[in-house]
Image (spheres, helix red, strand yellow):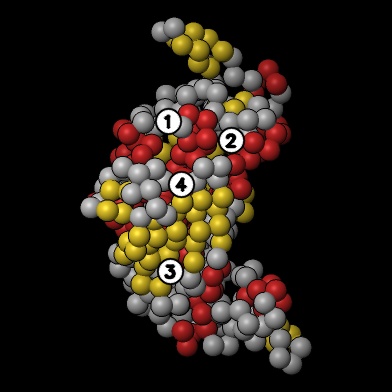
Amino acid sequence: MSQLNGKKLKLTVFGQSHSKAIGAVIEGLPAGIKLDTDAIQAFLDRRRPGKNKLSTARNEIDMPIILSGITDGVTCGAPLAVMFENSDTRSADYAELKRFPRPSHADYPAFVKHNGNNDIRGGGQFSGRLTAPIVFAGAICDGILRQRGITVGAHVASIGGASDSRFDAVSLSGAQLEELRHKEIPVINDGAAERIKLEIMSARNDLDSVGGAIEAAVLGLPAGIGGELFDGVESSLSAALFGIPAVKAVEFGLGTEFAKMRGSASNDPYRMQNGEVITSTNNMGGISGGITNGMPLIFKVTVKPTPSIARAQQTVDLKNRCDAELEIKGRHDPCICIRAVPVVEAVTAFTVLDMLYNEKG
């Protein structure tokens, strides 16, 4: 089992991609929170596979089965346990992968770590399938944050050579974040959706895959949340976001662009607006010294191309200890970036709520 341990909230994820079920246990939620089941299911449906050719053909219903922690639809203070049944599995597609590990997948390091006893089916516990219960937990946290006037949202910043517009880091609105949740491809500039589709289908037709980036935002966070050094907002969010399979980079504000700038251009000048302190720009992404400054929290997450591709690839034969060639069978995403958007939102909501509970109760 894998755990995301916050200061007040704890998330434990269990199961494997092709086990009978997967699920999670959420600890630390206060009693008295009414679950919006429709909103939670809508959140899950955005991550669900099998909807079109832009994702894997594996079709799971992803209907949560709540086992404990709820009485009459309201949290009762006990740990909330949920499970999702795995129904559309084809384990035979993975029979040879323990002997011929997929490049850039967890197959080989898991083989070494677990002495050859790792579950290879669908990637086992390393699969993106395990993000379904994470999204369930994040959807609950998202609902609680909304009641506090805090909005979490994200969009596809780029896939391959196709890019979307960036968030307006100073005047981004909650209505814009809400609108993104209702789009098949969550982009700010609708013209980018068609370019993104072409990138994904081009990779698919070439028996390949393609990576992408997701830009996320949190609105309504008050100034003063977080701490110095290892207790900073960047530290907490990064640790959680890197738990999402395929995430390889996280950057806040202008991120790597800072390397090309001078301080006079990168600094965010303070000014007063209606009696409140704001900044004229938001290059820092709403965080200074690890602490929120009251501006929108903005960051970007980069996900690698799906390592399971249909092209022949160089690998090794672990049985005969020699080089080998691998042609992967089965159903795999040509790009996971679109389905990863609600996962990034969910992990963000969970982490932000934990920080708020820790500081504000």
Determine the secondary structure under disc 2: helix
Mark 4 residue crowding within 10 angstroms, few (<14) / some (14–19) / many (20+): some
Point out which mark residue 57 bears. none
Amino acid type at image mark 4:
Gly
Other residues around mark 3 within 10 Å, as few (<14) / some (14–19) / many (≥20): many
The image position of residue 131, as x and y in percent, is 46, 60
- The residue that mark 1 highlights is 219
**Which residue sits at x=31%, y=54%?**
70
Which of the two discs, 3 and 4, labels the residue nearer the N terminus?
3
Helix, strand or loop under label 3? strand
Residue 233 tag number: 2
Residue placed under numbered mark 3 in the picture: 22
At label 2, which amino acid type do we have?
A: Val
Residue type, mark 1 in image: Leu
Q: Which of pointers 4 and 1 lies earlier in the amino acid sequence?
A: 4
Q: Is residue 317 visible?
A: yes
Task: Establish if 153 lies above or below 225.
Answer: below
Q: Which mark is residue 28?
A: 4
Q: Amino acid at mark 3?
A: Ile
Q: Nearer the viewer, residue 169 or 60?
A: 60
